[in-house]
Amino acid sequence: MPNRLDIEITSQSTDSSYTWRSAGAKEPKGTIKASLLPSGVAIGDVLKVEAEFMIDGIEITAVLPQKTKKDGPELLELFGTGKETSGVTTSLVKKKGKRKGRKDVRREPRNNRTTERKQPRNSKSKTERKGRKPYRSPRGKRLKPSKKYRNEYIKSLPELHKPLAMELSGSTIPNLRKVIKKMQLPDGFPDALLDYAEDLNQQLKMAEWMDKATAVENNIESIDLQDFRSVVASSGRWAKSPESIAVKERLEAKLNERIDQDHKKWLNSIEEALKEEKTVRALNLSSRSPKAGAQLPETITNSLIDQANKALNAEATAYRWSIVAEAVAFSPVRQKVVPEGLPSDISDDLNKSINKHGERIPQIARLFSVS
């Protein structure tokens, strides 16, 4: 890419070339072809050129035209539309008197209005603290089964039976009984209809279970563990066909693998929270074990107790004390936590929290004279 340079013509070496140097300096310097220079160039003229910087020197490739200086600013001449228009006229209007019947309403001073609207600065924080929700562990992907097996079963029924199947798919047998009671049917017909509806409902539930089981099997890694367990737990009642029994066995094996996998992640998340000294988070996580009856390792248990004891100290605020105590109340180490000290200012909210969870943390409740 060519570079721009200001040069000064120093001499004419031959008829076809001139010598030059950088304007205002001794270096760089070189020669330029006479054919590139404008006519009437003289020694000492300063020109703006484009040059290529080569290994063996600088080669001038073009001379840029010089800018002419203007004596004054550039002006734009306005010609207008060419139509003659009259000038702007003004007319004075007499000042009207005051409106009749207008009452003299005295406005309330602005200071009084603003003081009424003022709210205490801590009102928002207090409401947020009172409305604080208990910790809930994050859930996985919720179960959203399709209706493939259910629709296929309804489609296979005779035309006369399809309306009853559609009614049952969105309702229950007790609701169907109420509907039948309102209908004028021959004697003995309602009982026979209900007997058939119960058999039909059994088949519909089996088809709906297959829809749920298929949805779980397609999302083994991301499906919510609670939904996973629910589908497997109901398999004993609804998995009757050879196809559904095979799906049931696969889900049971996958569920055990998933529980072990989630259990390891759960322990790792508690350890990370303890390393970062996030005591409340670690306590909350410890109360949500994915494996029923599983105990925490001794190292994690000791770390939880140690951090909880230190968090419940005399320098902590009453609000902080309340949060930690509530997390301890639902953790597996609740019976082993012994606070290092009570807060200097015990608020009413703290007393209410201790009263609420006193049965779960009796050793802490005794410090507040709560039995």
Image (cartoon, grey):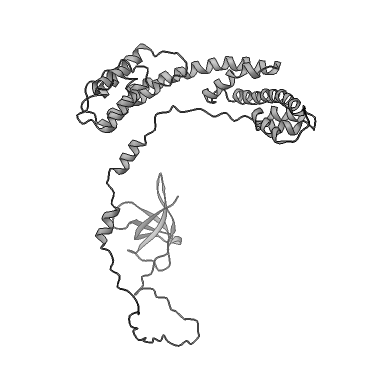
**188 or 312, which is in the foreground?**
188
> Residue at point 31% right, 58% down?
23
| Image quadrant where residue 61 sits | bottom left
Q: Is residue 261 left or right of residue 242?
A: left
> Residue at point 39% right, 14% down?
296
Q: Position of residue 62 (x, y in %)?
A: 44, 58
Query: Is 2 situated above or below 85?
Result: above
Q: Is residue 38 left or right of residue 196?
A: left
Q: Is residue 140 left or right of residue 165?
A: left
Q: Position of residue 46 (x, y in %)?
A: 34, 62
> Residue at point 28% right, 17% down?
363
Q: Position of residue 146 (x, y in %)?
A: 64, 30
> Residue at point 25% right, 22% down?
310
**234 or 348, which is in the foreground?**
348
Q: Position of residue 290 (x, y in %)?
A: 47, 19
Query: Is 1 situated above or below 144?
Result: below
**51 or 251, which is in the foreground?**
251
Residue placed furthest toward the front: 187
| Image quadrant where residue 133 sits | top left
Q: Is residue 215 visible?
A: yes
Q: Is residue 276 visible?
A: no
Q: Is residue 176 left or right of residue 305?
A: right
- Quarter the C terminus occupies: top left
